[in-house]
Image (cartoon, helix red, strand yellow):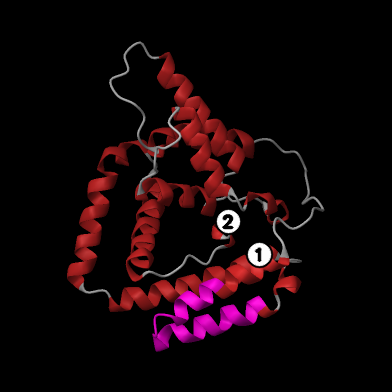
Amino acid sequence: MNEPEENWPLNYFNYFTEVEEHFQRARGTGLFLLSPVDWALIETWKDSGVPLEAVLRGIDEAFEKWRSRKSKFRQINSLAYCTQAVLEQAQRMAGLDTGSKRSESSPPFETAELEAFLRRCAGELRSKGDEALLSIAETLEALAAEAQAHLGDLEELERKLTALEEKMIAILRSRQSEEEALVARREMDAELRPYRSKMPAAQLAMLEQQYLERRLLEKAGLPRLSLFYLR
């Protein structure tokens, strides 16, 4: 379901915020907070190349179907309820051959914003006083020093940041005890249990991975490095 490289969505850096706000509007509860599972699910959609528009349409479709039901036993409390509708919308959009190319457009943020984000992430890693994280912080600082140049190829920068985050996760995973890993999986299973029947196996596997990785980083107090977290 990955989009062709030439259609890489430069305008999707607000992916998470857009999905969160759209779900809140559709639900009619602006103060509703997404769960860790919801955030991990959004990330699986983003990483799978599901277009933002497909997610937003899928959310609307799921709520329309829910509202049309005569019996509504409970409110929709998770994005997981919208999974099937989102995937169907993504499949429909994938079937449309528009022949579009990447449009020439301005970068989605300023040089100063990008540099500040990279330096902030580096600073958070340095603050841990962990020798294993120091090389990652140094790489981030080097990227920050050339922020203006990276605006010309954000896709390549995102690849580099993904590699750095994977290195960071590998370090944390190597230090995780068996008991800590078991506790994390128990929590994950408890949260995902209501939604397992609603998701394809491949997406469920990706969701489990995202959930566990997100939990590792949050517990360690380390930042997400993807440009999708810049704003």
Residue type indicated by callout 2: Arg
207 on left or right of 192? right
**Foreground residue among 96 and 33:** 33
Q: Is residue 60 magenta?
A: no
In percent of width and height, residue 29 lies at: 43, 31
**From mark 1 to mark 2, how far is it between C-alphas?**
9 Å
Q: Residue at x 48, y 21 (%)?
A: 64
In the rendered structure, are the residues bearing label 1 and label 2 in contact, judged by CB atoms less than 8 Å apart? yes
Tell me if residue 1 can be seen: no
User: Mark 1 is on which residue type?
Assistant: Glu
| Residue 159 as seen in the image, left or right of residue 39 | right
Residue 168 location (% of width, % of height): 43, 75
Of all residues shown, which one is farthest toward the left? 179
- Would you place residue 65 above or below residue 80 in this image? above
Query: What predominant SS class does the magenta segment belong to?
Result: helix
* 86 lies left or right of 2: left
* Magenta extent: 120-144
Is residue 41 or residue 225 the one in the foreground?
225
> How many marks on residues?
2
- Please identify the quarter of the rendering in which residue 119 is found: bottom right
Which part of the image, by quadrant, shows the C terminus?
bottom right
Q: Please identify the residue farthest to the right as the structure is shown.
A: 104
Name the residue at 62% across, 53% down. 13
Let me know if residue 133 is in the magenta part: yes
Disc marking residue 231: 2
Element at badge 1?
A: helix
Residue 56, by quadrant, is: top right
Q: Does residue 78 sit above or below 161 in this rendering?
A: above
Label 2 packing within 10 angstroms: few (<14), some (14-19), many (20+): few
Disc number placed over residue 113 in the picture, else none: 1
